[in-house]
Image (cartoon, grey):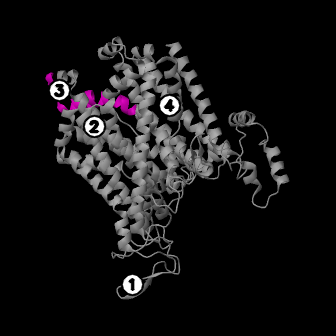
Amino acid sequence: MRTALGRLRRHRAALLFGALFLVLVGVAVAAPLWKDVAGRGPLANNLEGQVVLGGKEVNVVSLEGVPIDPTWGKQYFLGADTNGRDSMVRLLYGARNSLLIGVAAALFTTLLGTLVGLLAGFFRGAVDGVLRSILDVIWAFPVILLGVALGTALALGGLNLGIVTIDGESKLIPIVVIAVVYVPYLARPVRGQVLSLREQEFVEAARAQGAGPFRTMFSEILPNLTSTIVVFFPILVANAILLEAALSFLGAGVRPPEPSWGNMISVGVDRIVTAPHLAIAPGIMLMLTVLSLNAFGDGVREAFDPRAKLRMDA
Amino acid sequence: MGRFTVRRLLQMVLVMFAVSVLTFLIFNVIPGGDPAVRMAGKTSNDSTIAAIREEWGFDEPVPVQYVVTMRKVFTGDLVSYTTQLPVLDEIVMGIPRTLSLAIGAAILWMVVAVAFGLYGAMRAGAFGDRLITVLALVGISMPVFWVGALMNYYLGFKAGLFPNGGYVELTESPLDWAYHLVMPWTALALLFIGIYSRILRSNLLDTMNEDYVRTARAKGLSERRILIRHVLRTSMIPFVTLWGLDFGLVVGGGAILTETVFDLQGVGQYAADSIELLDVPPVLAVVMLAAFLIVALNAVVDILYAVLDPRIRITG
C-alpha cells in the first residue's frame, strides 16, 4: 500500500491530472462567488432584459429567441441560454450537480458492489447463485438502455422503498440509477478475488482463532480488496458523470431547470445551429473532468495494480 | 462438454426471462404509468378509459398481462401503445440502419485500434506512443452525442462536407449510403478506438514478456515477424472476443446516443423514443433483442473457451 502510494507520487502525469480534477472541484465549490459577480443565480430567467455591451444596450434574448453570445464580461460571460439565464453561472452550478452525482453514484456503486462481491465470493453456494443471477440480469442490459428506462420510470413515479421515499424530481434518482447500473462492473472482479482470498492461509488462521464469517469477511478479506476498489473508483466517477450526461440527453438525468453539464449539453445540442456556445462550454468542462479522472485513474492503476482488467461501457 | 453447454444455455434462458420480467415491471408498477389513461388522451372520460383498458387487457392482473405480452413477443404480434403500429415492422425497418452503423463503425474502430495498439506497443514510451495514449484518453472522455452534434454543426452545417443526418439505403446507392454514414461511424468509433487501442497496447506489452516470445527472438526471427506472428496473434483472441460482444451490443440498441444525435432511426433510437412515451411493447421488444444478443454472444464465447480450454468446464 505504502509502496503503491510512492509509485503514484512519482507518476507526474497522473498527479497533474489529479490536480486538474481538484481545481475543477474547487471551481464548483466556488460557484456562489461568481454568482455574486454576475449578479444573478443559476435559475433566474431573463427573457426581456438587456445588457450593456460596448456602450450599447443589447437584448439578452433576441426577439427571434436567439440568446446572446459570450460577452466575456461580468454579466453573461459565456452568453445566455434561451431563457436568458447566465450560462457561466449555470455552468458553475452545473459542475456541482455533475460532480455530486458522479461521486455519490460511484460511492454507492462501490458500497453495493463490494458488499455483493464479498457475500457472493465468501458464502458461495446459494447466496452466490442468487447474487450472481441478479448481476447477470443487470449485465444483460445495455447500460444506457437500462439507465434511461429506470430513470424515466422513476422520475415519473418516484421511488418508494418502504422506509424512504424519493421524489421523482430528486437528484437521488439519477444517482441511484447510475449506481445500480454499474454494480456488476465492480461486484464481478471483487467476487473473483474473494473466491481466491478465502482459500488462503491467513483466512484459515482467522477462522481457527474463532472469527465468525462476518468478522473474517470484513477485517481479514476486505482490507485485501483495497487496491481493486481504489483502482476502480476514479474510473467509476468518470463513467458516472458521462452516464448522467447521456441520461440527460435522453431526458432521464437531472431535471431542468436545475443545471447539470449533461442537461446543459443536451439543450445546447438542440440549439447548436443558433447558439453553439450552449453545447460547447459544458461539453468542454465535462470532457476535462472526465479526462482528468481517467488519466489520474490510469496512474492509480499503474501504481496499485498494473494487471487490473477494467472495462466500462459508456 | 455437453453438460456444460446445456447448463450455460439454461442459464441464458433464465436470465432472458428475468430481463423480460424486470423490463415489464419497470413500466408497470410506476404510478401514473397506466397506459389506458395516456392512450385515451386529454379529453377522455372514465368510460372510454375503461373501454381501452378492456380492449387492450389492462384490466387483467399484471402476471396475466405479462404472459399475454410475452406471447406476442414470440409471435411478433406486439403493437405499440402510442402509434398503434406493429412493433415488429418498426424493428425490421430499424435493423438495416442499426446494422449499417454497427458494421462500419466496428470495422473502423478495429482497424484504427490495431494500428494504434501495434504502434504504441512497438514504440512504447516514445512521443508517438504518448500522443496516441492522450488521444485515446480524450476519445473515451467525451460524450458521443456531444461529438456527434459538433460534427453535425462544424462538418455538416458549416463546412458542408457531409450531409446532416438522413439515411440512404445501401441497395439504393452504396456510395450515398457510406457518405451519409461517415460521421456517425466516426463518432461512434472514436469511443471504441480509445478503449480498444489501450487494451491492445497493454495486452501486446504483456505478451512480449512471455517466454515463447523470448524463444522466438533467440531463434533469430525478425522483430516484425515476432510481433505479427507470435505476439499479435495471441493478443488477438480476447480482443476479437470483445469485438464480437461490443458489436452485439451496438446492434441490440446500445448505440442509442449515436443513432439519436444523427437521427438514424435505428433500433436504439426507436427504444429511446418509446421509453420517453412509456410505450412498453417496443421497449420490451428492443430490450429482449439486446439482452438476447448480449447473453447469447457471451454464452457462445464461454462455450468456445470451454472447448479450447478444458479447465473451464470444471469450474464453470
- Look at 52% across and 19% down and name the residue there: A126
Q: CA distance from mark 3 to mark 2?
A: 34 Å
Q: Is label 3 or label 2 in front? A: 2
Give me the disc on residue B221.
3
Real-space CA distance between mark 3 and mark 1, rounded to the nearest whole angstrom: 73 Å
Q: Residue furthest top?
A: A208
Residue at label 4?
A135
The N terminus of chain A lies in which quarter of the figure? top left
Q: Which residues are magenta?
A: B217-240
Q: Indicate yes or no whether the magenta region holds residue B312.
A: no
What residue sits right under mark 2 in the picture?
A301
Q: Chain of mark 3?
A: B
Tell me how far mark 3 sits from mark 4, CA to CA.
46 Å
Say which amino acid is labelled 3.
Leu
Distance from disc 2 to disc 1, alpha carbons, whole Å, reads 51 Å
Q: Residues within 10 Å of mark 2 (few under 14, many from 20)?
A: many
Residue B223 picture location, percent across and down: 18, 32
Indicate left or right for B33 with A272 as reference. right
Quadrant of the image occupied by residue B194: top left
Instruction: Report x, y in % for residue A98.
Output: 42, 54
Q: Chain of mark 1?
A: A
